[in-house]
Image (spheres, rainbow, N blue to C red):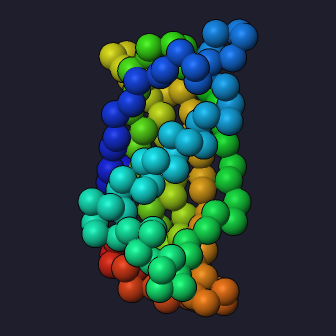
Amino acid sequence: MYIYELDFKVRDYECDLQGIVNNSVYQNYLEHTRHEFLLERNVSFSELHSQGIDAVVARIEMAFKVPLRSRDEFVCKLGVKKEGVKYIFNQAIYRKPDNKLCFTAKVTTVVMVDGKMTADFAPFDEIVG
């Protein structure tokens, strides 16, 4: 289940010689979506870091379905759940206007407080519900 969406448009410089979005750029789309999702819920990475709190990516599983091309408009969708000490962000990218699934990812994150992993982090726990 997706609980957040963010719209994008492919920029020319994000494409490789084949004329499709370079595989590494998809991680930028995912990260920007996660950050905007958290900011809308008053969770700021820079403020957390200044307090010794860092949310870090531990693992990413990606599946490329249909390539995006220059000037394609698309939406990045996000869902999140908690599994033990991990916060799992399930994300997908759909091309507009045909709603074609282009990409899926499972992003596993953990929260470190003063360099030590923590299982309970109230701001994220409230988001997960």
Position of 40 with respect to 104 (left or right) is left
Q: Position of residue 85 (x, y in %)?
A: 59, 81
What residue is shown at x 33% (from left), y 16% (from top)?
Answer: 97
Residue 113 lies, in percent from the top left, at 57, 88
Q: Is residue 113 above or below residue 40?
A: below
Q: Residue furthest front?
A: 50
> What residue sits 62% from the left and 18% below the top?
15
* Residue 124 visible: no
Q: In this view, does 30 lie above or below 118?
A: above
Q: Is residue 94 above or below residue 29?
A: above
Q: How many numbered discs?
A: 0
The picture places residue 71, in percent across and down from the top left corner, at: 44, 14
Residue shown at 55% from the left, 72% from the top = 55
Q: State the image coordinates of residue 61 (x, y, percent, origin top left).
A: 69, 49
Name, please, the residue furthest toward the top.
18
Picture quadrant of residue 128: bottom left
Task: Name the side, left or right, on which 36 lies relative to 66.
Answer: left
- Kindly tell me whether residue 43 is visible in this rendering: yes
Q: Nearer the viewer, residue 86 or 52?
A: 52
The quarter of the image holding the C terminus is bottom left
Residue for point 47% across, 85% down = 51
Above or below: residue 20 compared with residue 87: above
Observer-nearest residue: 96 or 39?
39
